[in-house]
Image (cartoon, rainbow, N blue to C red):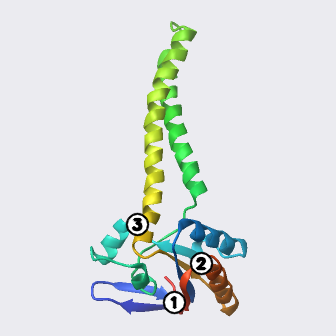
Amino acid sequence: MTSDATTDHDKTTVILIPEAVGIFDSFETLQAAFYDLRSVGFHHSDISLLAGHEALEEKLGKSYWRAPELEDDPKAPRAHFVSEEAIGELEGAIAGGFFFLGSYIAMAAMLTPVSTLAASIAAIAIGGSPAAVIGTILARRVGKHHKDYYADQIQHGGILMWVRTRDKEREDLAVKIMKGHSGRDVHIHGWSE
């Protein structure tokens, strides 16, 4: 069940499964809609968002874009939703991983038969602390990138969300949930990517 939508520069393939589309004005309303969609049985892979600025430039060029112009465009690049919780877990893993790595290297270097316990503890603290700082800085960059992604979307007219549906009942449910969380211009089109 596929159809080709031909463009001047490339070919875009879509599948003939309807999807709901809407625009959200804040991350919080988008996240609430996402969680409600998931709670009624929509699969994570059936929900997508507009991709980041770099992907947009790569696929659509450097032209200025607005969310309403892309909601029904099959060429609009897409990305999966990433929750604040997942970003927090990633930040923790990055910071903790760097601390562990620095501590492990220092410990391995200092735990020789001739080293003392005090020297080993000092080496772990000295080796782990700079690594933890580096990890924390990198983790903050991940969090900032995540926030900047949503801020950029909002600046360009809102955060686009697409939800693949399989029948009329699911279409109605997706539209109801998206509108219930302040989704704008929520509607169905007869294809999905």
Q: Nearer the viewer, residue 175 or 58?
A: 175
At x 33%, y 75%, the residue is 59
User: Mark 1 Cα within 10 Å, few/some/many (few <14, many 20+)?
Assistant: many
Position of 69 compared to 176: left or right? left
Is 166 drawn above or below residue 160 in the view shown? below
At x 34%, y 78%, the residue is 65
Q: Position of residue 43 (x, y in %)?
A: 64, 73
User: Mark 2 Cα within 10 Å, few/some/many (few <14, many 20+)?
Assistant: some
Label 1: element kind: loop
At x 44%, y 53%, the residue is 144
In the image, which disc is placed on residue 191? 1
Q: Amino acid at mark 2?
A: Ser
Is 85 drawn above or below residue 3 in the view shown? above
Which residue is labeled 2 in the image? 182
Is 57 drawn above or below residue 16 in the view shown? above
In the image, which disc is placed on residue 84? none
Q: Nearer the viewer, mark 2 or mark 3?
A: 2
Q: Amino acid at mark 3?
A: Asp
Q: Do the residues under discs 2 and 3 have CB atoms within 8 angstroms?
A: no
Q: Of label 1 and label 2, which has the lower sequence position?
A: 2
Q: Of label 3 and label 1, which has the lower sequence position?
A: 3
Q: Of label 2 and label 3, which has the lower sequence position?
A: 3
Q: Position of residue 163 (x, y in %)?
A: 58, 80
Whole-angstrom CA distance, mark 1 to mark 2, is 23 Å
Q: Position of residue 61 (x, y in %)?
A: 28, 75
Which residue is labeled 3 in the image? 152
- Tell how many labels: 3
